[in-house]
Image: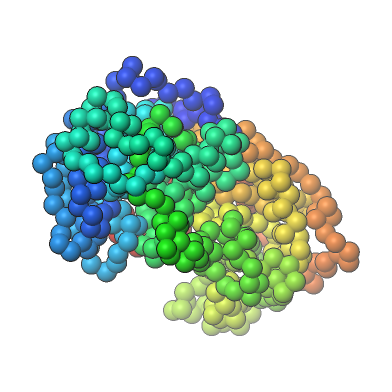
């Protein structure tokens, strides 16, 4: 629900059913915060603020926050700027655009947050064109257009006058403007409606979203100093976001792309190194099979409730051993009533608590194995989650074949029918997250995923190769319930704000708190 209304259900990234009002023919109501991370280049910032001072989006609903990321001399606010503009210093302990954005978001008051580079000259309808989409629903990410130009000799007065009159193009030589690869990709993929990974074009200079999404992904990752916008957009995708480019929001980026400069190749290498760590869908960047990454490709969830130590260890070892030949990018979450270190029952041989204590000690130093009392609502930031009975661990190459099928068919949920009549489930994180946003009270999440991404049932043998894997040798007690994947659960009430995750998350600025 958003504003008391049911959220529209968008399939994949086809936002065609959404119909924003024409620019200039509607009345905005949502307050907005424009956050500008900046380091040096005072003159370019002056031009950016001059263009912002001439926007058609109501000034009474807009605040501008410039975050000075360690400039020497410090940045100052120019004479021509929006009325409600302030400048803050980036906090100690970090640097970079992501670090500065978190500082700006921390003090922002708007329901809409716009991330804008400090070297952009935007047209007068830029903010209005992007923000009108956010008045429709709260899980969209809007992306403005841009071209590049070598910085001409301009004054803030010239920029303000040209933008206010609606002729910012007059400031630049049309023949010298360079189109961005982002705009070309957007056109090729029907405005991203046909894109399989629309987050990849969300590269940062002008992007806006609602606080609902910001709270869910908890801001920017300050560890990523290059490619931070793509990593941020990837996590937005895993939160169920829909990406909407609006080329009505025109802009000129002062200066050519950094990749075209003297150190362009080195910058690309640095970006790709960061993305290899945090964006599992860029599997082309994860060619080292034995490398452990902080974000896995697939999370495997096993409910250990009622299972003995031998069964649990056998199943986990089968999965970890299988990564020698199959999919290596995995993490295992063992869900159960894990005893605390001071629990005396865990010291009594023959008890379930004793078995669980043994398992925890056996795997607690393996970074691929996690322990939880319950699974998090989704696998984010991992793009896939496989939930299976404890005695039916996936074979060496099963997950590879399953995820490939899901990607090729663009599925949100693959229900795997096991030989004994039980089922396992491979769910796509972005689909599960969007289902949680859109489901009505009591509605089955798999029904929503069918609408937004698609669901398929298949026999396990479709993904096996000969010889077939052998099941774990032990048999769990018949009375032990098998954990259901999130997609087989129903929503008890509308998630007005996304639920907190059950796993601790790193604190990134004031937006973050441990669960």
Q: Nearer the viewer, residue 450 or 99?
A: 99
16 left or right of 110 in image = right
Q: Nearer the viewer, residue 452 or 475?
A: 452
Compared to residue 430, the image places residue 23 above or below, namely: above
Query: Residue at 35% across / 57% down in the picture?
Result: 98
**Residue 13 appears in which quarter of the rendering?**
top right
Query: Residue at 50% across / 28% down in the picture?
Result: 8
432 left or right of 145 in image = right
Residue 431 in the image: state x and y as whole percent.
58, 43
Residue 193 in the image: state x and y as whole percent.
57, 34
Q: Which part of the image, by quadrant, shows the C terminus?
A: bottom left
Number of residue marks: 0
**Residue 131 appears in which quarter of the rendering?**
top left
**Colouring rule applied to residues:** rainbow
In the image, farthest residue toward the right? 466
60 left or right of 331 in image = left
**Residue 38 appears in which quarter of the rendering?**
bottom left
Residue 511 in the image: state x and y as whole percent.
31, 54
Q: Which part of the image, by quadrant, shows the N terminus?
A: top left
Residue 147 in the image: state x and y as whole percent.
41, 40
Task: Tell me if residue 16 can be seen.
Answer: yes
Compared to residue 485, the image places residue 32 above or below, namely: above
Query: Residue at 16% across / 55% down in the picture?
Result: 75
In the image, farthest residue toward the top? 25
Q: Nearer the viewer, residue 50 or 460?
A: 50
Compared to residue 134, the image places residue 115 above or below, namely: below
């Amino acid at each position: 629900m958003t504003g008391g209304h049911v959220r529209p259900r968008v399939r994949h990234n086809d936002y065609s059913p959404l119909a924003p009002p024409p620019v200039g023919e509607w009345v905005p109501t949502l307050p907005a915060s424009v956050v500008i991370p900046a380091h040096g280049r005072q003159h370019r910032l002056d031009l950016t603020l001059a263009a912002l001072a001439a926007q058609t989006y109501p000034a009474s609903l807009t605040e501008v926050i410039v975050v000075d990321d360690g400039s020497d001399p410090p940045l100052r606010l120019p004479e021509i700027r929006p009325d409600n503009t302030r400048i803050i210093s980036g906090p100690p302990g970090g640097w970079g655009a992501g670090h500065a954005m978190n500082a700006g978001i921390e003090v922002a008051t708007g329901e809409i947050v716009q991330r804008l580079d400090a070297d952009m000259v935007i047209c007068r309808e830029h903010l209005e064109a992007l923000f009108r989409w956010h008045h429709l629903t709260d899980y969209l990410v809007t992306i403005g257009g841009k071209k590049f130009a070598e910085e001409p000799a301009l004054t803030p007065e010239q920029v303000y006058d040209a933008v206010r009159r609606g002729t910012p193009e007059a400031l630049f030589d049309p023949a010298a403007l360079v189109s961005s690869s982002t705009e070309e990709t957007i056109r090729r993929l029907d405005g991203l409606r046909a894109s399989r990974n629309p987050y990849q074009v969300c590269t940062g200079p002008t992007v806006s979203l609602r606080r609902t999404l910001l709270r869910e992904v908890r801001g920017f990752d300050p560890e990523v100093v290059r490619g931070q916008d793509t990593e941020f957009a990837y996590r937005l995708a895993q939160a169920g976001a829909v990406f909407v480019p609006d080329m009505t929001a025109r802009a000129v980026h002062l200066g050519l792309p950094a990749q075209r400069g003297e150190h362009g190749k080195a910058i690309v290498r640095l970006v790709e190194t960061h993305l290899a760590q945090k964006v599992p869908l860029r599997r082309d960047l994860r060619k080292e099979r034995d490398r452990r990454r902080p974000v896995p490709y697939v999370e495997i969830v096993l409910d250990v409730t009622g299972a003995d130590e031998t069964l649990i260890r056998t199943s986990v070892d089968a999965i970890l051993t299988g990564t020698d030949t199959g999919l290596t990018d995995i993490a295992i979450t063992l869900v159960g009533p894990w005893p605390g270190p001071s629990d005396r029952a865990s010291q009594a041989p023959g008890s379930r608590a004793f078995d669980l204590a043994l398992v925890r000690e056996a795997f607690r130093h393996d970074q691929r194995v996690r322990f939880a009392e319950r699974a998090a609502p989704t696998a984010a930031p991992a793009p896939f989650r496989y939930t299976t009975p404890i005695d039916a661990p996936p074979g060496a190459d099963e997950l590879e074949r399953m995820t490939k099928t899901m990607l090729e068919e663009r599925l949100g949920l693959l229900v795997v029918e096991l030989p004994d009549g039980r089922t396992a489930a491979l769910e796509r994180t972005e689909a599960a997250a969007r289902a949680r946003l859109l489901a009505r009270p009591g509605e089955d999440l798999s029904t929503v995923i069918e609408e937004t991404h698609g669901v398929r049932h298949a026999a396990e043998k479709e993904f096996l190769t000969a010889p077939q894997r052998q099941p774990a040798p032990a048999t769990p007690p018949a009375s032990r319930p098998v954990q259901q994947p999130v997609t087989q659960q129903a929503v008890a009430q509308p998630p007005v704000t996304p639920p907190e995750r059950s796993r601790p998350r790193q604190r990134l600025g004031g937006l973050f708190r441990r669960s």
